[in-house]
Image (cartoon, grey):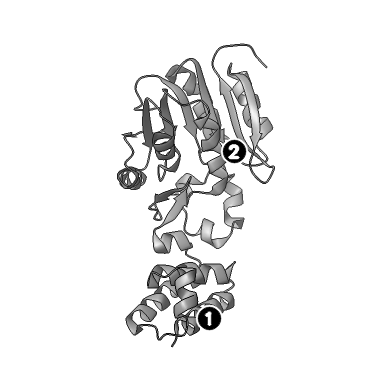
Amino acid sequence: MTYRDVLRMGEQKLSMADVAESGLNAWYLFAHCFSMDKNQFFLRGEEQAPELAVSHFNRLLDFRRRHIPLEYITHETEFMGLPFYVDESVLIPRQDTECLVEEVLKVCGGKDVLDLCTGSGCIGISLAVLGNCSSVTLSDISGAALEVAERNAEKNGADVYMVKSDLFQTIGGKYDVIVSNPPYIPGGVIEGLMPEVREHEPRLALDGGEDGLSFYRSIISESRMFLREEGMLFFEIGCDQGMAVSKLMRAAGFCRCEVKKDLAGLDRIVCGQIGGEHV
């Protein structure tokens, strides 16, 4: 089979398995297996593909046909222009979360930052690499997630601290900024999600309790003890949670609470500050 035949075969297999964006998924798996970019494919498409690599490609296609997410198959993804390793112990970083990082980057220079519920470490590591922070601490209840985060810190040369903690249980000291992308999907909604999410991404990182707000309540109520005066708290939220989360923050004494939107124009970030005037 030529390289062009192999790619066409992959597209057909994924399409027949009802994989969304089957052509794009087939290309990413093809590029991963054959270490080939679009320019090389254009030049070499009619060459015969090595049988061993074709067999490997077919194995990866079988994984994707079972709706295992592409990133868990290749163990590769990109976030904020940085490379990250992922496996099924952590959520796959989403582009929406880059909006959260971009907001924190505006204020984190020279500050001590805590990334709570860090997962793959994509938020905290991006801040450590791009944000000129004084320090960045990554925390998660999952030891497996922290192993992934540590691997990603090494991959990106990020100087960060790691703490295994159930929210603030074993956190010490105070911070200028706390940022978190906590589990926020209502428990009853998870079974209706696409199979890539409900069957493969860690439920521990998805389930936000009956109304999706359980972790926000806990973090907001405890965070004041770990924030310095004028310290800031940033959250990623579900697109319908902006009003509820900002209300919780105001009730807990946070000031300057704002709801910010993602690139699609949906509510995605809530932030607030300790001290100052209530607005």
The residue beneath circle 1 is: 8
Q: How far across and how far down the image is residue 229, in percent?
A: 48, 13
User: How far apart are the alpha carbons under marks 2 and 1?
Assistant: 39 Å
Residue behind mark 2: 237
Q: Identify which residue, 240 or 175, lies in the foreground.
A: 175
Q: Say what secondary structure mark 1 lies in.
A: helix
In the displayed structure image, the side of residue 270 where residue 161 appears, left or right: left
Q: Is residue 56 above or below residue 69?
A: below
Q: Is residue 46 visible?
A: yes
Picture coordinates of residue 140, whole percent (x, y): 39, 38
- Up-down relation of residue 5 to residue 101 (above or below): below
Q: Is residue 28 left or right of residue 192?
A: left
Number of other residues with Cα within 10 Å of mark 2, as a class: few under 14, some 14 to 19, many 20 or more: many
> Which residue type carries mark 2?
Ile
Q: Residue at x 54, y 30 (%)?
A: 234
Nearest the viewer among 72 and 100 is 100
Residue found 64% across the figure and 44% down from its top:
263
Dot 1 alpha-carbon crowd within 10 angstroms: few under 14, some 14 to 19, many 20 or more: some
SS for tag 2?
loop
How many numbered circles are shown? Answer: 2
Q: Nearer the viewer, residue 19 or 99?
A: 99
The vertical placement of 49 against 268, above or below, is below
Q: Residue at x 62, y 41 (%)?
A: 238
Q: Which quadrant: the N terminus? A: bottom left
Foreground pick, 84 / 257: 84
Is the C terminus in the top left, top right, bottom left or bottom right quadrant? top right
Image-quadrant location for residue 164: top left
